[in-house]
Image (spheres, helix red, strand yellow):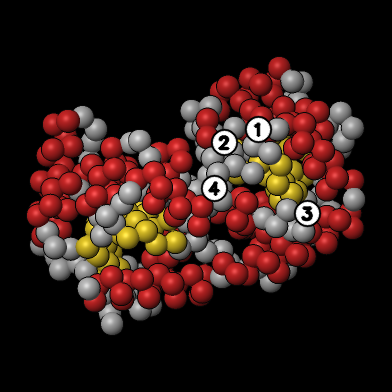
Amino acid sequence: MKVKLLFVIRDAHGWAGTERVLNLVSNALSNRHEVEILSLSPRPSENIGYKYKKEIKRSYLPVSHGVINVVASNFSIATFIGKSDYNAVVLAGIGEIKYFLLAALLHSTKIVAWEHFNAAYTHKRFNRKFAARYCSAIIVLTSQDSADWERLLSPKAKIVHIPNPVPNFPDHAAALTSKRILALGRLEEQKRFDLLLDAYAIFSRTHQDWRLRIRGSGSKEKELRSKVISLGLEERVEILDPTADVDAEYSDASIYAMSSKFEGFPMTLLEAMAYGVPCVSFACPNGPSEIIHDGEDGYLVRQGDVAALVVRLNQVADDENLRRHMGEKARENIRRYDIGRITDIWAAFFEKLCAQ
């Protein structure tokens, strides 16, 4: 059964994890279904962002904040959806549902909300409450988040667990010979890179030849750069812009570190493990604990426990055999999230949803 799908995202040309996984899933599904991407930001002057297959149509309907703009956008989006016979509209970001209230009420098209964070931190927000009541389904990334949605929001919508896929499995694993710790992500409060810097400051006292590289952009950049200076780490810590060449970053890393306050299902952990890079992460809700097998292919430590993070970084850095063993197991274990397997789950979901 071939269906017509519209995926909606704030900015189809962004570089963050949501944009990355949308690109992967929509490209894969376009082999089986008709797929269109609607960006709620203006078309950029240059073609930046992740590359979509030529058969995927991209449309643009910019929206703005403010009550008047949200109301106006509801009418324009309802009109846009009414002109096409989409079987399902998938919001890659539940926050965008405020622009789809009218469409959900007026049209028979199935509205699906794709949760990229988690209910434990977001269930009190209006957008989650509306999605739980008026969407046909909610896609969540972890089994824990599925349970949280049921417990905290009592949804009328069907809760469906579909994890993110691994983007690709490189032919060759990282060499794990460089003395570099890597961390990727938005420079925002959620990622708690300040705690990673605290941990690295302690770690580097006994590992002066190891370097930390953080790649990302965001509102905390100035604050983090100031912290690097205050800790006297200017020669050992790099804070660099995001890059499209993440393959080179993983290939040149020996440890991947995650210090987030919360996550959905972090793509960077999947990517690092596919390269055979052992990961050391806070066991934050909800993704890392479902991805990393603690002590086998990486380490999990208690949320916010900087001292424990340092201990695990020390262990992986000091024991080359452990590092290589964990890297091999990471590469092996992460295949359960192969893009082919995840695409089959998505396709089966749409076929069942649109047959109802």
Numbered circles on residues, count: 4
Amino acid type shown at disc 1: Gly
Sequence-wise, the earlier of marks 3 and 4 is: 4
In the rendering, at what x and y percent does residue 150 appear? 39, 51
Q: Do labels 1 and 2 touch, CB within 8 Å?
A: yes
Q: Do labels 4 and 2 touch, CB within 8 Å?
A: no
In this figure, which residue is indicated by the disc labeled 2? 261
- Residue 286 — which label? 4
Amino acid type shown at disc 3: Gly
Sequence-wise, the earlier of marks 1 and 4 is: 4
349 relative to 127, above or below:
below
At 61% from the left and 25% from the top, the residue drawn is 224
Marks 4/2: CA–CA distance: 10 Å
At 48% from the left and 70% from the top, the residue drawn is 342
The C terminus appears in which quarter of the rendering? Answer: bottom left
- Residue 295 — which label? 3
At 72% from the left and 31% from the top, the residue drawn is 306
Question: Of helix, strand and loop, which one carries label 2?
Answer: loop
Marks 1/2: CA–CA distance: 7 Å
Q: Would you say 66 lies left or right of 260 here?
A: left
At 74% from the left and 49% from the top, the residue drawn is 299
Instruction: Choose top left, top right, bottom left or bottom right for residue 161.
Output: bottom left
Marks 3/2: CA–CA distance: 21 Å
In this figure, which residue is indicated by the disc labeled 1? 304
